[in-house]
Structures are given as C-alpha cells and as structure tokens.
Image (tube, rainbow, N blue to C red):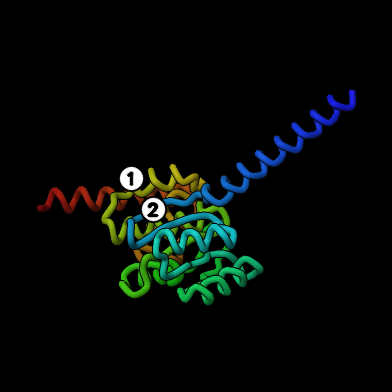
Amino acid sequence: MRTAIALTAALTILVAAIWLTVETKRNRLVWDHFDVVKRGILYRSGQLNSDQLQAAVKRYGIKTVVSFQLPGEDVYSEREIARRMGIDFMNLPMPGDGSGQEFQFREVLKACDDPERRPVLIHCARGTCRTGAATALYRFERDGWTVEDVVAEMKRQTYREGWLPGYVFGMVRNRPGQEIFQPAVALDRNLRIGNEKKETTNVR
C-alpha cells in the first residue's frame, strides 16, 4: 500500500515537473501575436514579458521598441529593459480600441524609415487593434498594398471588424475629424477610394 502511494506521489511530481518545463518553454517561445511585418524593418506583437522582449531584441536585432500601452508597470519595465540593452523605447499611449492620433502612428513610420532606428518592434496589449492600425498604415503607405489586402491582413490578425478599416484610411486621406469609427462611414470611404482609383486608371 505504502509503495503504491509513494509511486503515485512520485508520478504526480514527475508529471508536474514535466508540465512546468513544457509551460516554461512555451511561454518563452510562443509570443503573443508576434509576426514579421517586413523583415529587418518592422515586427509586431502583443505585450511580451521581460524574457520574451529581451529574446526578441536579440533574435531580430530590434533597435526601437514602440509601445501603444497606457502608462503603467509594463511601460516602465520596458523602458528600463530598453535602457539596459541600449535600444530606443517610445511610448505612444492610446486607448485599447486603437483610436490614437494620426501623429502617433506616423511616428512609427518615421522610425521605420530611419536606418539607425530599425528594426522596429511595435506592440499593444494583444497586438491586434492599436498594433493592427499602425501596421495597416505601414502596409498602405510604405508597401503600397490595396485596401482589400490591408483589410484581409487586419482580419487575420483579429482586428475588431466593426472598425475596419475606415480609421486608418481616414488618416491616409487626411480626414481625421470625421466619424470614421462608424462601419457605414468606413465602407463608404473605402468605396470612394476604390472608385477614385478606377477613374484614375480609366483616364490613363
């Protein structure tokens, strides 16, 4: 009886140890919504812990980390990590729905355009809304993607579909004052952008 109990206890401890090892490795290797936007220039993710952030910086040679998080412990911790690692850190705080100011998103473009500041890692809490909006602007203005392709990527990255994609393209069109979060307005704007492209093509 005692042998059986001891064996059960030993097996329980062994299983717990294996689970802890696997979980630790998973936590270190699987980064929340991490993705390569453009190798050597722009990377994106959700909030990484200290070990993950340092690993990302070393693995991808990150020179600038941009956080869209509101001021708090995570921002303070990242700033300290960046300081210790000798890289730049920029906090562009905005609400979780991604409704930042146009100049904030354009700071990301400036960093990506500067060879001394890239590669750049951008992130928010989950790497979807705020990070998705910044990535969309990069795709649209730097990679020359179509509206449809940008929207498809945003959907794959689980961007909240009700806000797709008028906000970002409102910035592109220099119309930040409009009610661009309303889906109907977003759809109307994208249709107009598409029609304008067709008209331009026909003229040529």
- Residue flagged by tag 1: what amino acid is it? Glu
Quadrant of residue 73 within the rendered picture:
bottom right
**Residues marked 1 and 2 touching at CB (< 8 Å):** no
Residue sitting nearer the eye, 124 or 173: 124
In this view, 145 is above or below 80: above
Query: Which residue ends up furthest to the front in the rendered image?
Result: 3
Query: Looking at the image, which residue is at 29% across and 61% down?
Result: 142
Q: Which residue is mark 1?
A: 148
Specify whether residue 99 is in view: no
x then y, percent, for residue 29: 52, 49
Task: Specify the amino acid type for callout 2.
Answer: Val
**Mark before the other along the chain sequence, 1 or 2:** 2
Q: Residue at x 28, y 48 (%)?
A: 194
Residue pictured at 59% horizontal, 59% vertical: 49
Q: Residues within 10 Å of mark 1 (few under 14, many from 20)?
A: few
The extreme top residue here reads 1
- State how far apart marks 1 and 2 are (Cα): 20 Å
Q: Under tag 2, what secondary structure?
A: strand
Q: Which residue is mark 2?
A: 36
Query: Viewer-nearest of labels 1 and 2?
Result: 2
Hey, which quadrant is residue 94 in on the image? Answer: bottom right
Residue in the foreground of this view, choosing between 165 and 92:
92
Q: Residue at x 69, y 41 (%)?
A: 17
Quadrant location of the N terminus?
Answer: top right
